[in-house]
Amino acid sequence: MKKISYNLIIIALLCIFGCNKKENNNQPQKENMENLQVSDYGVTAKGDSIKKYTLTNKNGMKVEVINFGGIITSLTAPDKNGKYEDVVLGFTKPEDYFNGNPYYFGALIGRYGNRIANAKFTLEGKTYDIDKNDGPNTLHGGKEGFHTKFWNIEPVKDAKFPTLKLTYTSADGEEGYPGKLSTTVLYTLTDDNALEIAYEATTDKATVVNLTQHSYFNLSGNFTKTITDHELQINADKFLPVNETLIPIGEQKSVKGSPFDFTISKPIGKDINADDDQLKKGKGYDHNWILSGSGMRSIAKVYHPKSGRVMEVLTDEPGVQFYSGNFLDGKFDTKTGGKNEFRTGFCLETQHFPDSPNQASFPSTELKQGQKYQTKTIYKFSVKK
Ligand code: BGC
């Protein structure tokens, strides 16, 4: 009898030891799963059931992403007192994302971020007519860009930090673009409070690609406040002047001595109302800056003095569209009350230059069969006291 119970104790101990060991091996996966919540978000008119994925890092910073448009609906960042608040604009009702999202709040943009003049381009001797949705031009892909598409989302189980993998396949001919484009975007929330966005794409036929993210930031944590008090620095000596329809005219202009000079940090509102032809054309800042250097590098910093929040942007892209929210028009409620008024958010959309398919002097946005499109952008949050 004694011998049996002794054996049982040994077996029990072995089992406990074995179970623990198994749990330890699985720890990264378990931790990642703890840092991911999935909930129902809404149903689109097409009947797609939309889910919301919430990633949380070890500091409690959160990013919320939906599988409609790969949209970031919320992103929190700490202020100088350690208070985490939402710093990205968004709608209060899911259907406002589903029924058009006229401002492209938080969305993944494709197949071509920014504008293509006269909604056409020529590739390998063939002219392609694409969707016209912005006067004579194409903006952010076309009428139904990637921001309106259903993206497949799955958590990356063995990643170091909580990561979501989003995939979307754009059919050959969609919105007039040639080639079936297979797109993957990884959203990673690191423990140093950075949101990393890694884009990849392949095609079965030559096409053009320029993917970006269209989050509007307001580091005050109060979306009724304008962003003109945010201090911005951009590592760029030149920008691209535009025509009346916001297409670059081809010139690469020095920022020196102009309202476009952000080489030294200054409040966004400092020169925004200057008597300047380019500012009039954009109704404020809505231009592409030609970023200094190449490869992955820090390209811009934004500081909100009152909250102490700082956002640094790093990318391997040659350009950034700095857009000061000039078309926000107070038609929708904000998540912190009030309406989404003029200049209550700004975008720093990292990308290749607008209209590159029609401008031979710009870095190429062409992707051929067998090539891999790969680019990365990081929005990193910290505080300055
Ligand atoms: C463009 C703006 C446009 C906005 C859409 C920005 O990327 O540069 O001109 O109005 O997107 O909300």
Image (cartoon, helix red, strand yellow):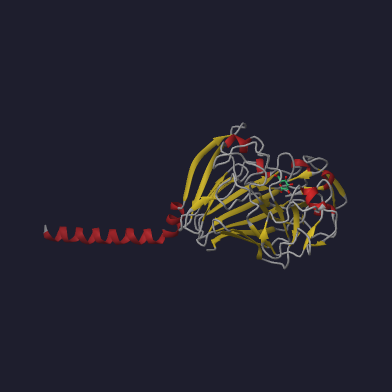
Q: Residue at x 45, y 52 (%)?
A: 33
Q: Is residue 357 visible?
A: yes
Residue shown at 83%/52% (left/top)?
A: 277
Query: Which residue appears farthest toward the right when viewing the image?
Result: 125
- Front residue of 140/88: it is 88
> How many numbered badges does the structure rendering display?
0
Q: Which one is nearer the viewer's eye here, 181 or 250?
A: 250
The residue positioned 30% from the left and 62% from the top of the image is 17
Report whether 223 appears left or right of 252. Answer: left
**What percent of the width, then of the height, locates residue 321?**
72, 54
Residues 144 and 123: in front is 144
Residue 48 showing in the rendered view: no
Which percent across, then down, holds residue 37? 47, 47
Q: Residue furthest left?
A: 1
Residue 108: give x, y in percent of width and height: 65, 48
Q: Pick whichever, 221 or 299, lies toward us.
A: 221
In the image: residue 302, left or right of residue 3:
right
The image position of residue 209, as x and y in percent, is: 74, 52
Query: Up-down: is 116 above or below 81?
Result: above
Tell me the quarter of the image containing the N terminus: bottom left
